[in-house]
Amino acid sequence: MSDHDLIVVGGGPAGSAVATLLARKGHRVTLLERETFPRFQIGESLLPYNNDLLRELGVWDEVAAQGFVEKHGAEFTTGTGGPRATFRFSRTLEEKYWKTFQVTRAVFDEILLRNAARNGVQVREGAAVRDVDLSDPARAKVSGVTSDGEPFELEGRFVLDASGLGNVVGRKVGGRVEDAVLRKVSFFAHYEGVAPNGEDIEAGNTVIVAIRGAWFWMIPLTATTTSVGIVVERDHAKSCGLSPQELLEQSIASTPYVAQRMTGARRVSEVHARKDFSYSMAKPFGTNYALVGDSAGFLDPIFSTGVFVAMKSAELVAPALDDYLRTGSQAGFRAYTKALRRALARYFEFIENFYHREFLEVFLQPSERFGLLDPVIGVLAGRIFDRNRDWFKLRFFFWLVRMQKLFSVIAPEISWAALPEPARRHAHASEGSLA
């Protein structure tokens, strides 16, 4: 008999959430996390449709008490400062989704992990999983090493991969399909002294700044600290001849909207780099494993989907796990896979189109006469997993984008050539290389 019903690999939002939900059902759950919390993590912006699960997990009040910056919407503009669109959640959503938070992930993730332990999960930090044996369909074995160098091996009836981009189980089973278009790299840091985005409730909004072939995020984390990052094509990062710090800071300086808000700002962290290669997994579940969060699929972070998709996928897979552990049925995993793939496909369509002029012209200049504000705000808030909700209106939105591309009659044109591009070293300078 296995010592564990469920072994969860990874203690981020997805792993902590699903571990908590399964432990509450009476299952023996062990969570293995390679790091010791608190630890730094990127992806600071939540979506309102996180709120329900935070309340179900019992952490809403604790999260709200941290003094995190409140987020009431999302804003998008171009590098020249216009056109500009503000999508306030209260315009179309129920009151319980009018706000969410910009979080410090070290604090937020630790709240979720400690909550899992309070709910009966055996949490083991500093336990890095190195291998998974799935050869016996009735059980799974995981092995690894602790932060003290001690090897360990555990056996359970089922293993859930919530290891994020580490994709421990996913790499074992294979079937990773990378998006041929969204091969991006991000460079980011924290800054003090960034000018606020207005003085009312919009000050806490995420601001996305589009330039040609790239985009910036500006996320207020505290009253004084802002996360600023740029997402560029991988090929540009490799060929531009600049270090990560140079690429970020020179791109800031050459983008009028960002530069103006950062006049006098001071960087207070190192510049981090991350490969934002969007992908999906062909086999998100098997007889003794399932993938959740970034392990099941990763999205370019334009729409701040990281924590939301991680926790929503955890919420969706939990009843499937409970049913399997009680009855042996995997029907719930098939339903989970369909729902996850459908939602990711909707996001992929928005994200891939975001890099094109005609999409930005329609998106940044929304006309309420087409009735599209509600479905677009729904996407930005995380209302994406409902099979039928908004489907027709979103199809109409993308039809308008196609008409804009062909005839430029839906919205005023953006002066594409006037937009900045990500920085590169002058042609006469020697070229460098970025991983």
Image (cartoon, helix red, strand yellow):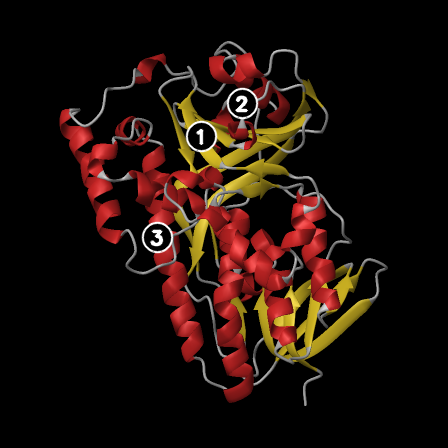
Q: Nearer the viewer, residue 2 or 44?
A: 44
Position above or below: 139 against 292? below
The residue under label 2 is which amino acid type?
A: Asn
**In the image, which disc is placed on residue 75?**
1
Label 2 element class: loop
Q: CA distance from mark 1 to mark 2?
A: 10 Å
Confirm whether residue 44 shows in the render.
Answer: no
Marks 1 & 2, CB-CB < 8 Å contact: yes
Label 3 element class: helix
Q: Residue furthest bottom?
A: 1
Give the residue drawn at x 61%, y 73%.
22
Residue wearing tag 3? 345
Q: Nearer the viewer, residue 352 or 427?
A: 352
Residue 242 shown left or right of residue 420 in the figure:
right
Confirm whether residue 283 shows in the render.
Answer: yes
**In the image, which disc is placed on residue 197?**
2
Q: CA distance from mark 3 to mark 1?
A: 23 Å
Residue 199 % position (x, y): 56, 22
The residue under label 1 is which amino acid type?
A: Glu
Quadrant in the rendering for residue 330: bottom left
Q: Earlier in the sequence, mark 2 or mark 3?
A: 2
